[in-house]
Image: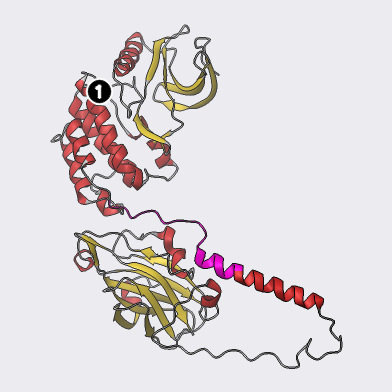
């Protein structure tokens, strides 16, 4: 049932519950704008009502781009209290995590720094939040993340506890794990170890909110530029040429008067298939059709038995798309791979018996080819085939006759691409007959 509120507020949807507070999406008809209305339980004690009102009213005295604005707070006619809060169309980090989504890495550093700076502004005004967690941070991709949920039951009145709680919420927001042993840079590609240091210092009480904001703001993002998901000219131009050719042939065919008994309509023998010759230097293929005509079907998967069992799965289809301008890459490692684990790889479920494996990858990448009928339970179950170091691309390795099964491309050393950053880019893996 919708709460009893001043007439200017029209409630639309109940969004959920934050402890003893109901949250509603509503419209402020006086200003014609959407708002979030937080409604304290009508049977709340006088002490709790006072806590809700004073906590929310104190937050209203501070304006910051990363603090949710407070438009009104008052006792409700039917008991309890309500507050009208800024609505930016976002959802809480807790809700995102419940849906299996963490804070996007590209959005993490600017929003994490901004939230710490917003909390520092509260503290500078003598205001503490008192109950920060992932549910108190609201995020929308189109707007800055906001610290909200003012008026909660207070767990602390100390600013240092606010800062530690925010740092913990930020760590959970980007890793999806509540374990304090999980370091963001170890789990999340694109975050350097300095993020771990800043969050750890804030959680331990060494940093206040201002120092946390300063530390996070100074960390440069190491994310690669986004790859365009649009059509590639490399595909469009050959496709357009084929389309034009097909139209011309069709038009010519319609204009020629053909003898229905002509033997040229139905050749007595099928055309002879073109022989395929595999060499160690393969000419660049520019279309998916040409690759498919000279390759064996393969479905890639990431293989990380000595790590977190994950390695950029979303880009795996780029390994077999026939476009050498796209690529899958390993995570970014901040030490040479052999110092961290025995390796990381890619498995391919192959239909047929390949004669060679062609790899296009970053120079100085050291890899091995292994095979098994099915993915073994331990790494020792793989059959080693051979090892290569990528000098020029493509690199081709001849393989023995194995029909079907699983092929493993196993990276044991990856090049240093920038100071303190190691990764390899794999543009294409092709299994040729």
Which residue is nearer to you in this view: 21 or 105? Answer: 105
Kindly tell me whether residue 374 is visible in this rendering: no
Q: Is residue 50 magenta?
A: no
Q: Position of residue 401 (x, y in %)?
A: 44, 88
Q: Residue at x 29, y 73 (%)?
A: 363
Q: Say which element carries label 1.
A: helix
Q: Residue at x 19, y 47 (%)?
A: 194
Residue 407 against residue 8 in the figure, above or below: below
Q: Position of residue 394 (x, y in %)?
A: 37, 78
Q: Residue furthest top?
A: 77
Q: Residues within 10 Å of mark 1 (few under 14, many from 20)?
A: many
Horizontal side, residue 184 vs residue 291: left or right? left
Residue 178 against residue 250 in the figure, above or below: above
Residue 193 against residue 2 in the figure, above or below: below
Q: Position of residue 297 (x, y in %)?
A: 52, 75
Magenta part of the chain? 222-240
Q: Which residue is mark 1?
A: 122
């Amino acid at each position: 049932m919708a709460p009893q509120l001043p007439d200017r507020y029209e409630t639309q949807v109940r969004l959920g519950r934050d402890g003893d507070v109901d949250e509603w999406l509503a419209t402020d008809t006086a200003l014609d704008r959407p708002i979030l209305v937080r409604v304290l339980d009508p049977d709340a004690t006088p002490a709790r009502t006072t806590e809700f009102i004073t906590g929310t009213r104190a937050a209203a005295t501070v304006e910051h781009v990363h603090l949710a604005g407070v438009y009104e707070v008052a006792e409700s006619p039917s008991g309890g209290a309500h507050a009208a809060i800024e609505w930016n169309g976002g959802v809480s980090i807790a809700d995102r995590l419940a849906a299996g989504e963490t804070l996007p890495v590209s959005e993490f550093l600017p929003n994490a720094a901004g939230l710490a700076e917003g909390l520092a502004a509260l503290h500078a005004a003598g205001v503490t939040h008192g109950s920060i967690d992932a549910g108190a941070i609201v995020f929308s991709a189109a707007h800055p993340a906001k610290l909200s949920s003012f008026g909660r039951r207070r767990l602390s009145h100390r600013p240092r506890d606010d800062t530690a709680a925010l740092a913990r919420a930020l760590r959970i927001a980007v890793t999806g794990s509540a374990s304090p042993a999980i370091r963001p840079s170890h789990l999340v590609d694109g975050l350097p170890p300095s993020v771990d240091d800043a969050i750890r210092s804030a959680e331990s009480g060494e940093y206040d909110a201002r120092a946390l904001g300063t530390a996070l703001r100074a960390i440069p993002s190491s994310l690669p530029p986004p790859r365009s998901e649009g059509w590639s000219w490399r595909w469009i131009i050959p496709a357009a040429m084929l389309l034009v050719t097909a139209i011309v042939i069709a038009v010519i065919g319609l204009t020629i008067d053909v003898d229905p008994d002509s033997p040229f309509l139905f050749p007595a023998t099928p055309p002879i298939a073109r022989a395929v010759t595999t060499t160690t230097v393969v000419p660049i293929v520019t279309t998916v059709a040409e690759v498919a005509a000279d390759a064996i079907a393969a479905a890639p998967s990431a293989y990380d038995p000595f790590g977190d069992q994950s390695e950029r799965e979303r880009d795996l289809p780029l390994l077999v798309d026939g476009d050498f301008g796209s690529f899958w890459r390993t995570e970014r490692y901040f030490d040479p791979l052999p110092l961290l684990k025995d390796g990381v790889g890619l498995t391919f479920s192959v239909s047929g018996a390949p004669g060679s494996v062609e790899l296009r990858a970053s120079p100085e990448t050291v890899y091995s080819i292994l095979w098994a009928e099915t993915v073994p339970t331990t790494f020792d179950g793989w059959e080693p085939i051979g090892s290569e170091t990528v000098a020029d691309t493509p690199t081709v390795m001849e393989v023995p006759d194995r029909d079907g099964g699983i092929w493993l491309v196993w990276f044991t050393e990856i090049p240093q691409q920038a100071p303190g950053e190691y990764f390899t880019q794999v543009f294409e893996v092709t299994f040729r007959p």
